[in-house]
Amino acid sequence: MYLILLTFLGIKNLLIKLLNLYPVRPVQPTLSIVLLFSLSLPYSCVQQEQEWTEQQKQKGTQRERAVPVEVHRLTLGTVRSTVKAVSILSPKEKASVRSLISGLLTELYVAEGDRVKAKQSLAMITRPGAKSLIRKAAGLYRKSKHDVQQLQSLVKKGLAPREELTQAKFNRDQSAIELTRLREEAKNETLRSPIAGVVVRRPLYQGETVSPGQAIFEIMDLSQIYAPLNLPDRWSTMIYEGMQARLYDREGQLLSAQAIVSHVSPIIDANTGTFSVWVSPKLTTPPKNKRKRSHKKNRTNKIQHQFEINSKLKPGLFVGAEITIGEHKNVLVIPREAVIYKDGNAQVSVVKNDRITIVDVTIGYQEAQVLEIISPLKVGDAVVTFGQRGLESGTLVKAIWPKNSILPSSSSKSVNQSTIKKDLEKSKKDLDAVNSSMKR
């Protein structure tokens, strides 16, 4: 509009210059008329533009604009109430094999990662001169025993005093004790596993010197592991042995869906206000074979099967435990993002006849993505899951239905499929119309 005005002003200046250059009287009336027309035309254009703008404003106030929102239809489902905590997996049975004598580590029968049985030989420790000491002690014991027998016959005949017999018996007992000690030490030269499990640590190598009390092997039973938890005392009356639980890794991936609470401490730590809970993965029995096998072989296969099941669950692994303390089935569920809180009250925006109605709701069990609604909504109600903030009751909206508008649940009841199909088709058309209007 400003360009048009400037154009007409330029024409006016040109006409004035022409009048000054060519002052011809017969032409003056015509030029005057042209000059007046050129001056009045821009003002009339500006007036028309103002009138058109006012008309558009009046139309905009008469027609209400609909707000596009994402809508979800409510269904029935299952919601669980859980207690979550983090822990590090530990084995139920662990043994540290230590040397009871000093010597040279001459034989190593197992390495790290090997599976061993109870009382299986692990290593051999050699003591220089140990065998000769045993032979010497055995010779002294035989000699003292023979001396006692001779003195007994002499004492009976009265040829030897009784004090010599008493001293001989004392020497015999002392030599017997020394021989027993040496033989027990000889047994300690062979290191054996106290439990069945897996060798997880062996810090020494063959040929090294060991001393009494030095750790040589560390063995763990990987078929029986658990996650120790320290929970607040407010859960002490709700958690008991046998409750269902789940184990997750650091990234939230499910490790075991069949874990159980295997132990609950009977006391509460007064210093921390917590109590101890163990969560153990539930082991399944190996498949039965029709052919008869010995009891020992069946037990070995069972341990091997349990070891294969727990290949992902290793001691020292950081896990998250989730204990289920309650489960409500066939209840009304709603996405968590559909609920907003105002002044401490949970509210939901319900769409009915393309209008918003703000409804106060009561929340039951809560999960990460869904919540249980106790009242006052019902199955099939359409609630806003995105775009509800700032809306008031009575606001005109355009419902946009996502593809996953029905919550997936094993126990969810489906609503009228024809109604859902019509709603989806209508929402698609509305979305296309909104996109086209935005492009314009």
Image (spheres, grey):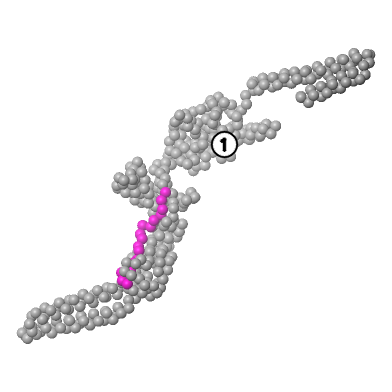
Tell me the quarter of the picture where residue 351 sits: top right
Residue most extreme to the front? 20
User: Is 368 displayed left or right of 181 in the figure?
Assistant: right
User: Is 316 displayed left or right of 171 in the figure?
Assistant: right
x%, y% of residue 127?
32, 76
User: Is 270 displayed left or right of 279 in the figure?
Assistant: left
**Residue at position x 41%, y 43% from top?**
82
x%, y% of residue 270?
30, 45
Tell me the quarter of the picture where residue 435 sits: top right
x%, y% of residue 433?
66, 32
Q: Which residue is mark 1?
A: 417
Residue 119 seen in this snapshot? no
x%, y% of residue 367?
46, 41
Relative to 326, does residue 173 appear above or below in the rendering? below
Q: Amino acid at mark 1?
A: Gln
Quadrant of image for the N terminus: top right
Relative to 28, does residue 324 appear above or below in the rendering? below
Query: Crowdedness of circle 1 by 10 Å Cα count: few (<14), some, many (20+)?
Result: few
Viewer-closest of 163 and 186? 163
Determine if the magenta segment contains residue 104. no
**Residue at position x 28%, y 81% from top?**
132
Residue 228 seen in this snapshot? yes
For label 1, the SS is helix
**Residue at position x 59%, y 34% from top?**
400
Viewer-closest of 161 and 302? 161
Viewer-closest of 291 and 35? 35
**Residue at position x 17%, y 81% from top?**
145
Quadrant of image for the C terminus: top right
The region drawn magenta spans: 86-102
Tally of numbered discs: 1
